[in-house]
Amino acid sequence: MQCICKIVENRELCNDVFEMKIECPEIAREAQPGQFLHLKVNKAIDPLLRRPISISRIYRDTGVISIVYQCVGKGTKEMAALKEGEYIDVMGPLGSGFTLFDGGKFAVVGGGIGIAPLLELACSLKDCDAYLGFRCNTFKLDEFSSACKELYIATEDGSTGSKGYVTDIIKDITKYDVIYACGPKAMLKRVKELCEDADVKCFVSVEERMGCGIGACLVCACKIKEGDTWHYKKACTDGPVFAAEEVDFDD
């Protein structure tokens, strides 16, 4: 669905990482962890293109959705300048989200801005650990700590948690029934390898450039394996979440 939604909060969490909370009751009722919103920021800047931003939290009781985004280009800079009480054109919820299971022990593995889409998922799982990797500045640690049984952190500069990459601190992967991951392609590839070696089910949310967000433009096509054959699926409609064994991270 598409609607004009009121911004109830837009604040900087850390260096160039922002959280925007949007009042959109209709979307909040339907949204699931792993889906995304498609936002039209400013017609003068991009009359056609929207910005796809993953859903971070869903507050169904108030009809509010939280998104976390990194300010990297002209569109996200315009988003960062928006104030509480202003309105934004929102399309969503879009995409195929994470597969949820009734029981088991789970872990979420996130890197960089890919951490944000895992928060609503972590809140939805009863027995979940979190492994989060940052370059330096951290965000949303308190919320992950509240949602998860154990929280493990890695930063590339060692300023918080362990020094290094998040895939270096994953502990005893065989104790998990399912791993969910979102982040840079190199991180997802390594998580896939770890899960394959341990025979643990894994789902990944891929980060692909998107145009239309509804499957028409083919910009976000990614290589997927089904059986013994390879073909392409659209991250915006078939994903962004896929079973890890399906995804070719070397493409």
Image: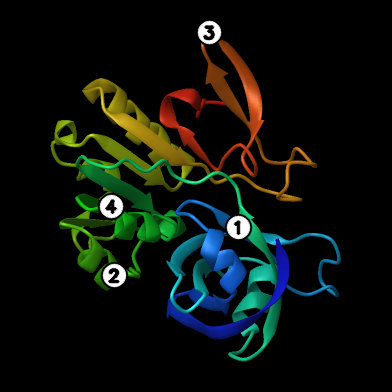
Tell me if residue 156 can be seen: no
Could you give the CA–CA distance between mark 2 and mark 4, rounded to whole angstroms?
A: 14 Å
Q: Earlier in the sequence, mark 1 or mark 3?
A: 1
Of 98 and 41, which appears nearest the observer? Answer: 98
Q: Amino acid at mark 1?
A: Pro
Could you give the CA–CA distance between mark 3 and mark 2, rounded to whole angstroms?
A: 41 Å
Element at badge 1?
strand
CB of mark 3 within 8 Å of CB of mark 4? no
Could you give the CA–CA distance between mark 1 and mark 3, rounded to whole angstroms?
A: 32 Å
Residue topped by disc 4: 125
Residue 184 is situated, as x and y percent measured from the top left of the image, at 46, 45
Of 4 and 79, which appears nearest the observer? Answer: 4
Quadrant assignment for the N terminus: bottom right
Displayed quadrant of residue 118: bottom left
Could you give the CA–CA distance between mark 2 and mark 1, rounded to whole angstroms?
A: 23 Å
Residue topped by disc 1: 93
Q: Which mark is residue 201?
A: none
Q: Earlier in the sequence, mark 3 or mark 2?
A: 2
Residue topped by disc 2: 143
Residue shown at 65% from the left, 26% from the top: 232
Could you give the CA–CA distance between mark 1 and mark 4, rounded to whole angstroms?
A: 20 Å
Q: Which mark is residue 228?
A: 3
